[in-house]
Image (cartoon, rainbow, N blue to C red):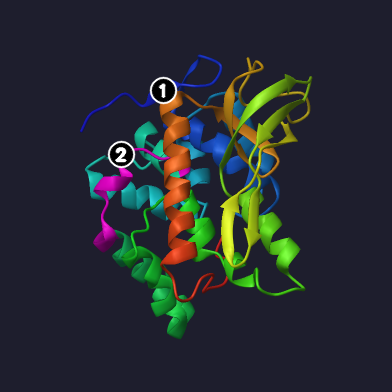
Amino acid sequence: MGAPLATRSGSGVAVSGAVSFVRYAFPPNYHGACGPADFRGLFEHGANAVAGPGLRDLARQFAGAWPYLELIAAATGVRDPLDRRVVEAYWVGNRLLDRVGAGPLGNSMDDRFRLRVGGQFSALAEAAVAGGMPHHSYHVFCIYPWVGLLGDDRRYEQALAVLDRCRVRWGQVRQVLPAQLVVESQPLLFENGTLFLGTPRLETVERTLDGIGLVSGFAPGDWVSMHWEWVCDRLSARQLAALRHYTGVHLDIVNNRLDHPGAITALG
């Protein structure tokens, strides 16, 4: 299934799927949560829009994200896990996710986690059977343990903060600062045993590292995606709708369809 590997970024400059991957993968890598040890090397690939073999090698070191890219590509007949459509499907969402199916996702979970989690695997597999898709929100809400810690009074605030920051979220730019954006977005809340998105509020997110950004040209009114405390990219209307949709799918699963939410240890 041939397709161009480049897509239009928030700045209007064509970038590859690999460079788009950097924009979303850099924030957790910056925190040392996953990926290669050299976060600056990853950032430089994205800032310079260099999608050579070195970047592919770095992407393979994301033990959480890379297997999902491989799964989406294999299940939909796309040759390259870093094809722009595959990268977009995982981080933002698109129709490739609807073509993967519960069987391939369940098999992938089996290959990745059964030996590592032992008796906990049946609880982990619930989300795939319940309609989970290989989207980043699936990994955050259905695989990470943090949802299961929301009922622990000692860990509640930390768990909710991690879930809110780790999900890829959306917001509308209200002010552009030299190194940051002020964005209006909906926070993730938890009440009466339910996770939901609250009333929009302002937050400030980073857009440069040492004065260099991965995306430029933001303006008030733009819709953007964010991961941890960093802006990732500008969102088109289609992408915004997709991110909302697939996030909603996995919030519904974790709220209404699982007997054992947050079943296993965080896996990066």
Observer able to see residue 128: yes
Q: Residue furthest bottom?
A: 119
Q: Residue at x 26, y 40 (%)?
A: 78
Instruction: Give the residue at mark 1.
Output: 7
Instruction: Point out the image quarter for the N terminus.
Output: top left
Residue closest to the eye, 235 or 56: 235
- Identify the element where label 1 is drawn: strand
Q: Is residue 118 above or below residue 176?
A: below
Image x and y of residue 55, in percent: 51, 37
Q: Residue at x 39, y 40 (%)?
A: 89
Residue closest to the eye, 109 or 145: 145
Residue 267 highlighted magenta (yes or no): no
Pointer 1 local density, CA inside 10 Å: few below 14, some 14–19, many at least 20 = some
Residue closest to the eye, 48 or 239: 239
Q: Is residue 201 shown left or right of residue 45?
A: right
Q: Are marks 1 and 2 in contact (CB under 8 Å)?
A: no
The label nearer to you, 1 versus 2, is 2
Instruction: Give the residue at mark 2.
Output: 95
Give residue 163's quadrant in the image: bottom right
Q: Residue at x 74, y 28 (%)?
A: 182
Observer able to see residue 52: no
Image x and y of residue 157, in percent: 75, 62
Q: Which residues are magenta?
A: 91-104
Sequence-wise first label, 1 or 2:
1
Q: Amino acid at mark 1?
A: Thr
Give residue 49's quadrant in the image: top right
Image x and y of residue 103, in percent: 25, 63
- Identify the element where label 2 is drawn: loop
Q: Is residue 224 shown left or right of residue 142?
A: right
- Gap in Å between the C-alphas at discs 1 and 2? 16 Å
Instruction: Point out the image quarter for the C terminus.
Output: bottom right
